[in-house]
Image: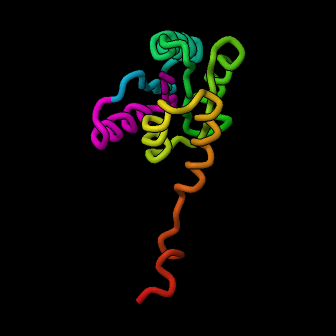
């Protein structure tokens, strides 16, 4: 099974997982790494390395969901692209996380990354557009 790690600034990763598990229940091979300004990059990198070892233990790879491109969580995660079986997607959201948990069983790592990127784009809605012409 593909593992999932959310890597974000502060506690966003932990809160996304708590919210997702409130909706769908506990999910295996799902972990959070929150990076605070008080923690050095070296310490954050080592924490991610350890979590990758656990979450990636099945050998199917790990999808890392980060909060924003160019931020420290993404930059640290990108260091593992060459040495690990990893895909990274930026702009993590609750819909993206829920889909990653449900879709990882039927996809390979690259296929899951492609599917999630498209899914996340389509999950952004503007209700006013949908309601025009109604009522």
Q: Position of residue 2 (x, y in %)?
A: 51, 24
Q: Position of residue 73 (x, y in %)?
A: 58, 28
From the viewer's side, name the closer residue of 52 and 118: 118
Residue furthest to the bottom: 135
From the viewer's side, name the closer residue of 52 and 42: 52
**Residue 11: within the magenta?**
yes
Q: Which residues are magenta?
A: 1-26
- Residue 89 in view: yes
- Residue 72 in view: no
Q: Is residue 16 above or below residue 3?
A: below
Q: Residue shown at 44%/33% (left/top)?
A: 13
Q: Is residue 105 left or right of residue 14?
A: right
- The chosen color scheme is rainbow
Q: Residue shown at 68%/20% (left/top)?
A: 81
Q: Position of residue 97 (x, y in %)?
A: 46, 39
Q: Residue shown at 42%/21% (left/top)?
A: 29
Q: Position of residue 131 (x, y in %)?
A: 47, 79
Query: Which corner quadrant holds the C terminus?
Result: bottom left
Q: Residue shown at 46%/27% (left/top)?
A: 34
Residue 68 falls in which quadrant of the image?
top right
Residue furthest to the front: 106
Q: Is residue 77 above or below residue 53?
A: below
From the viewer's side, name the closer residue of 107 and 94: 107
């Amino acid at each position: 099974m593909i593992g999932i790690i959310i890597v974000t600034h502060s506690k966003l990763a932990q809160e996304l997982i708590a919210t997702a598990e409130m909706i769908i229940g506990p999910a295996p091979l799902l972990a959070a790494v929150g990076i605070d300004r008080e923690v050095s990059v070296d310490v954050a990198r080592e924490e991610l390395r350890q979590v990758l070892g656990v979450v990636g233990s099945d050998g199917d790879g790990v999808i890392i969901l980060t909060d924003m491109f160019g931020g420290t969580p993404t930059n640290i995660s990108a260091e593992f692209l060459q040495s690990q079986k990893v895909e990274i997607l930026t702009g993590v959201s609750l819909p993206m996380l829920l889909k990653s948990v449900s879709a990882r069983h039927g996809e390979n790592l690259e296929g899951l990354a492609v599917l999630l990127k498209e899914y996340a784009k389509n999950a952004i809605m503007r209700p006013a557009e949908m309601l025009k012409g109604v009522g």
